[in-house]
Image (cartoon, grey):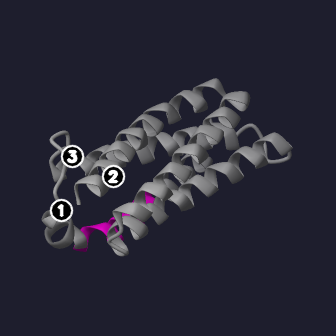
Amino acid sequence: MNIPKLIVSIVICQLVGFIGSILTRPAIPTWYASLIKPSFTPPNWVFGPVWIILYFLMGIAASLVWQKGLEQKQVWNALILFGVQLVLNALWSFVFFGLRSPLAGVIEIFILAVAIIFTIQSFFRISKAAGILLIPYFLWVAFASGLNLSIYVLN
């Protein structure tokens, strides 16, 4: 295990989470608090710890792929897909919370979920463990998609 690659991968993922939180945090007590939410909405305090864990797992997964060697086209393609889904991940916070648009959030999170599926498939081809580590992320985004869609419908 290449520790510097592991650290860089985890830090990049956590930075994406930090950027998303900057966009999210101001809207929580104001706009988001005013929305009608479905009964399955978790308490606000749950989101932070869940995302920290997911970004940590994502970082480990990315490092497992990266450690297979950037000279391999398959590794490059997988990491590019990973980067695309990271950008989409941060973009959702901007779209949903920054623009205060549940509808745009639904559209964006669907695109994110598709990008995660492609990323998982590409990671599995390189490292089964890396692919498995992204499954909780996909499951959480699937849950968040349902939550986002419900908020759109209710409001």
Q: CA distance from mark 3 to mark 2?
A: 16 Å
Identify the residue under disc 2. Answer: 148
Which badge, 3 or 2, comes first in the chain's sequence? 3
Q: Callout 2 environment at 10 Å: few (<14), some (14 to 19), or many (20+)? A: many
Could you tell me residue 89's position as x and y percent?
48, 57
In space, the residues marked 1 and 2 are separated at their CA atoms by 11 Å
User: Height in image: 63 above or below 13?
Assistant: above
> What amino acid type should be assigned to the residue bearing mark 2?
Asn
Q: Indicate the amino acid at tag 3.
A: Val
Question: Which residue is at 66% across, 35% downward?
Answer: 123
Q: Amino acid at mark 1?
A: Leu
SS at badge 1: loop
Depth order, front residue of 153/47: 153
Q: Position of residue 139 (x, y in %)?
A: 42, 34
Label 1 neighbour load within 10 Å: few <14, some 14-19, many 20+: few
Pointer 1 or 2: first along the chain: 1
Asked which secondary structure carries label 3, the reply is helix
Q: x and y percent of residue 124 in the render?
A: 66, 29
Q: Which residue is mark 3?
A: 46
Question: In what quadrant of the picture does the N terminus appear?
Answer: top right
| Quarter of the rendering occupied by the C terminus | bottom left
Give the residue at mark 1: 35
Badge nearest the viewer, 3 or 2: 2
- On the picture, is 82 further left or further right than 38? right
Q: Separation of disc 1 and disc 3 at Cα?
A: 18 Å
Which region of the structure is painted magenta?
14-26
Residue 29 in view here: yes
Q: Report which quarter residue 104 is drawn in.
A: bottom left
Q: In the picture provided, is 5 more to the left or to the right than 18?
A: right
